Image: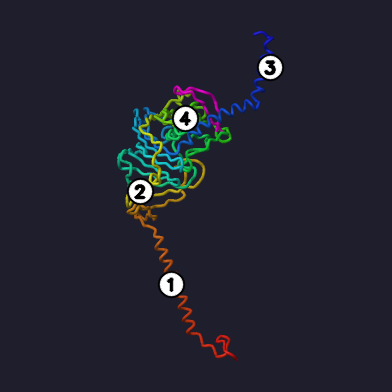
Amino acid sequence: MTSRYVPWLCSAGLLGLVAATLPGFAAGAESDLDRVLARLQRQQDSANAVRIRAEGKRFVPKGGYTEVAPGQDGRVRPPEDETTPLKEDWLLDFRSGRWRIVSESDAFGRRGPWLQVFDGKKVYGSKLDVTFDEAEGVRPNRMGIISGGDHINNFLIGEYPYFLSQGFILTNMNQSFYWHNFKPSLDRENLFVHRQETVRGRPCDIVQTYPAGPKKQEHQYEYAIDREDGSVRRWIYWTWGKKDTEIVIDYRRAGDRMVPTGWTFQRFVVRSDKPWRPVPYKSETLTVTAVDLDPVADDSRFRITVQPGTIVEERHYPNGASVRLDEVKTERVTHYRADESGRLVEGELVNGEFRPHRPWLWWIIGGLALVAVFAAGITYRKVRARRSPAAPPGSPITGGSA
């Protein structure tokens, strides 16, 4: 290249920089993001209610947790490769903000189906003593309740595919699928179109969040949004520049809706011997076995009726920052016992014995006390009137003449 072309190239570069700052260019970048968000919004608007059943497995390789300091997280690290069957049945009612989950796993170290329900105010959870396929309509003999706290009990990352498949995304680290509001808004101020990429043979816009909060934290979400149908094909969570989690979802078309057919979920860890390449330490692969885009979502679907005599404990948490439940101090604990109809009667446990509160008894006692006071007042007035001397004739009391 001769020196006579250098001024022209410099001028062209300068013009390019100036042009990039013009409103037209900024509007073009903005329209790209608006176009992506409009596709996502259409997905969300059509997601009135959906029921998804899925089956698969969780795989943890030998020593899968050993990259964390020994004993630090309290997890059991498998001495051999570990495979766990998984089954899940989700009912999401986006119109009223309620959900119902039946999942079969080894949660809390106990294998079996678990039932969780959010009725719009409280979360109810039960361990079932039946098989997964028998969970429908069963009345459990144990239950716990979580209430209060607007930033607690957020969904685990492994549950995100159900929301992503309906077009619901998290747009910053301060949002989460809280059980008080699992429809976070599309916060366009914290999103930008980073590039275009082909994911599973589908052309996608790669949308990223800025680092959270003041845009200085090293956390980012990345979404691959299908350029044709607006479905979320992939989600990656980056922390400190390393891949922490990845979810890839496959779909089929059902009329004007995109329906998930399955997904792969992977968690990664940075090995000390290979710090440049995170490797998966846990993966879950699920296949969707049934989808209902117009399920029954009445009040009865978001209620758990326990067996008579069941003792139920409710833990109420204060509002505050988004943290794990086990890191939040319980504000108060309330106990109930189910009567014959399954209705919960409030009371207290004294030396293991449940003693119901009887507010109606106190109403009766209070009413009787008021009647007694009123009767005593009348009796007192009568007695006092009898004991008072008669007024002389012509006094102002009798009204006679002088």
Local crowd size for mark 4, using a 10 Å CA cut-off: few (<14), some (14–19), many (≥20): many
Q: Amino acid at mark 2?
A: Thr
Quick check: 74 above or below 9?
Answer: below
Would residue 282 be visible to someone looking at this image? Answer: no
Question: Marks 1 and 2: CB-CB under 8 Å?
Answer: no
Q: The magenta stretch spans which residues?
A: 190-211
> In the rendering, which numbered label is found on residue 232?
4
Q: List the residue tagged with mark 1.
A: 372
Q: Give the SS element for disc 4.
A: strand
229 left or right, relative to 16: left
Nearest to N terminus: mark 4 or mark 3: 3
- Could you say which is closer to the camera, residue 59 or residue 247? 247
**Foreground: 370 or 323?**
370
Evaluate whether residue 297 shows in this view.
yes
1 or 4: mark nearer the eye: 4
Q: CA distance from mark 1 to mark 2?
A: 42 Å
Q: Earlier in the sequence, mark 2 or mark 3?
A: 3
Nearer to us of marks 4 and 3 is: 4
The kind of residue on which mark 3 rests is Ser
The residue that mark 2 highlights is 305
* Mark 2 → mark 3, Cα distance in angstroms: 75 Å
* Earlier sequence position, callout 1 versus callout 2: 2
- Applied colour scheme: rainbow
Tell me the element at label 3. helix
Residue 62: x percent and y percent? 36, 27
